[in-house]
Image (tube, rainbow, N blue to C red):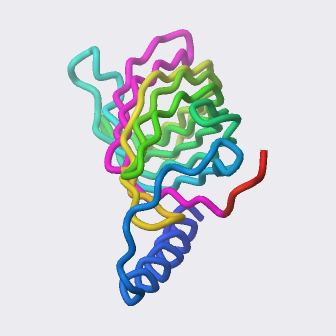
């Protein structure tokens, strides 16, 4: 499902980029007025995590990340972030899912955006070994930020997003480092 969303966003961005590539080159427009700030940002892409990185021996896992951000003003938004990563350790298959929500502060320029956020929500860890499945869920928080570089009027490349993801699962605290990259799509603007 995550791959399908990512491929769709890539196809939309590529067609938009192609249309601009064959169009005459125009000077970069100034930032839009506050009334025309985009209402929503959609992100989908690849995620890499080092689980329990503070203990020095956690596994590296890979998967997907997606978020939707509602723009509340030029600099402030409310974001919901979901991710899923998969890997193995000590012969057990691991899956970690998280869903988080919170404020995001964005510094917008003509070339892209720099943002920071603080999110809270939940996480679920699933471990499978020798035909036995174990599921545990708990609280999760994330603090981090990232950089988006504008590709077209509606698409950007999220060059990097870095998060410190703290999870409390099965009575244990895990300190996770999460890195993500992918595409951001802005479906339209709204008058405010």
| x and y, in percent, of residue 56 in the image | 21, 19
60 up-or-down from 123: above or below? below
Q: Residue furthest bottom?
A: 22
Near-viewer residue (66 or 37): 37
75 up-or-down from 42: above or below? above
Q: Residue furthest right?
A: 192
| Residue in view at x 60 percent, y 51 percent | 41
Q: Quadrant of residue 136?
A: top right
Chief secondary structure of the magenta span?
Answer: strand
167 up-or-down from 31: above or below? above
| x and y, in percent, of residue 11 in the image | 49, 78
Specify the segment rendered in magenta.
159-187
Q: Quadrant of residue 5?
A: bottom right
| Residue in view at x 53 percent, y 69 percent | 9
Locate the N terminus and report the quarter of the image it occupies. Answer: bottom right
| x and y, in percent, of residue 53 in the image | 29, 22
Near-viewer residue (26 or 9): 26
Q: Say whether residue 166 is left or right of residue 5.
A: left
36 up-or-down from 128: above or below? below
Q: Residue furthest left?
A: 56
| x and y, in percent, of residue 74 in the image | 60, 36
Q: Say whether residue 111 is left or right of residue 42.
A: left
Q: Say whether residue 57 is left or right of residue 138.
A: left
| Residue in view at x 46 percent, y 18 percent | 166
């Amino acid at each position: 499902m995550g791959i399908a969303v990512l491929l769709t966003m890539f196809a939309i961005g590529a067609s938009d980029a192609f249309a601009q590539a064959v169009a005459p080159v125009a000077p970069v427009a100034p930032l839009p007025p506050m009334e025309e700030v985009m209402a929503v940002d959609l992100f989908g892409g690849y995620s890499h995590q080092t689980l329990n990185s503070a203990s020095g021996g956690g596994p590296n896992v890979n998967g997907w990340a997606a978020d939707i951000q509602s723009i509340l003003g030029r600099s402030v938004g409310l974001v919901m972030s979901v991710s899923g990563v998969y890997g193995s350790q000590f012969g057990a298959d691991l899956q970690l899912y998280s869903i988080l929500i919170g404020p995001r502060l964005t510094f917008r320029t003509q070339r892209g955006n720099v943002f920071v956020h603080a999110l809270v929500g939940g996480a679920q860890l699933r471990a499978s070994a020798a035909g036995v499945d174990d599921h545990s869920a708990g609280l999760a928080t994330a603090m981090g930020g990232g950089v988006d570089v504008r590709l077209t009027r509606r698409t950007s490349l999220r060059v990097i997003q870095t998060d410190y993801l703290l999870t409390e699962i099965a009575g244990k605290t895990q300190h996770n480092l999460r890195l993500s990259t992918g595409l951001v799509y802005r479906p339209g603007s709204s008058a405010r």
